[in-house]
Image: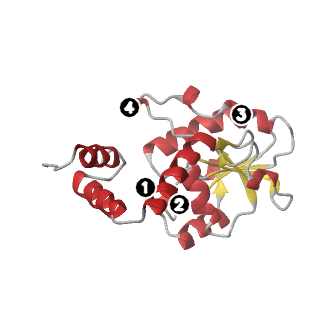
Amino acid sequence: MNFSSKLLEDAVAEFAKLPGVGQKTALRLVLHLLNRDKEEVNQFSKAITKLRNEIQYCKVCHNIADQPVCEICSSPRRDKSLICVVEDTRDVMAIENTNQYNGVYHVLGGLISPMDGVGPSDLEVDTLVERLAGNEVKEIIFALSATMEGDTTIFYLNKKIKHFAVSISTIARGIAFGGELEYVDEITLGRSIATRVPYENSLTR
């Protein structure tokens, strides 16, 4: 792609680094910004810079937050005895949108994937075990994507925590195998949370 400006070329190259954004889409986005008021573009730039510099991760559940403890963990209305284990923040948002869950979360920060060089030590596993040691938690729900990586992660976590006096369940498989949680429609995901099954039962299906 030929550019009439090095500034334009550099901006397009940066946008093209975003997932799912090719050069043509990146060029369209950059040209769109050029057509906006300078102040509007400055606000866009400030928002991204502020996000990167000031964003925090909840010290309890590892969800993205503005404060050391996220709004969900600090809310007195949430059931702290119920922890839903998810891969990342996108899954928290997806489940919250169902309005079917009133517990708290634990964000692993990924899934076990030997092919990608991701092992248990790369995930927030130890802090999950620490939360269970406090004896406040009564149930753990595994809400991980229905993929080989998701199932491997659930199997590993179950071995790590099964000696605790907590119920271990997994979301109902209304979700097709290979499906990413964040792309499941809200109704199906909500029903999967509401009709969760004991983890041991899910192994026989």
Q: What residue sits 50% from the left and 69% below the top?
A: 185
* Percent position of residue 111, x then y: 51, 39
Q: Is residue 15 left or right of residue 86?
A: left
Asked whether the beta carbons under mark 2 and mark 1 sit within 8 Å of each other, the answer is yes
Q: Which mark is residue 127?
A: 3
**Element type at mark 3:** helix
Alpha carbons under labels 4 and 1: distance apart: 19 Å
Give the farthest residue toward the left.
2
**Mark 1 Cα-neighbour bin, 10 Å: few <14, some 14–19, many ≥20:** few
Q: Residue at coordinates 26% horizontally, 49% vertically from top-left?
A: 8
Amino acid type at image mark 1: Phe
Residue type indicated by callout 2: Arg
Residue depicted at 26% across the width and 52% down the height: 22
The residue where tag 2 is placed is 173
Residue type highlighted by circle 3:
Thr
From the viewer's side, name the closer residue of 181 and 195. 181
Q: Secondary structure at mark 4?
A: helix
Marks 4 and 2 close (CB-CB < 8 Å): no
Q: Earlier in the sequence, mark 1 or mark 3?
A: 3
Give neighbour class at mark 2: few <14, some 14-19, many 20+ (Cα, 10 Å). Answer: some
What kind of element bears circle 2?
loop
Residue 116 visible at all: yes
Q: Give, as a three-letter code, the residue at label 4.
A: Met
Determine contact: label 2, label 3, CB under 8 Å: no
Q: Read off the residue under disc 1.
A: 177
Q: CA distance from mark 2 to mark 1?
A: 8 Å
Q: CA distance from mark 4 to mark 3?
A: 24 Å
For the point 51% across and 28% down, the residue is 119
Residue 111 higher or lower than 38, as above or below = above
Reading the chain from its start, which is encountered first: label 4 or label 1? 4
| Residue extending furthest toward the bottom | 187
Residue 36: image quadrant is bottom left
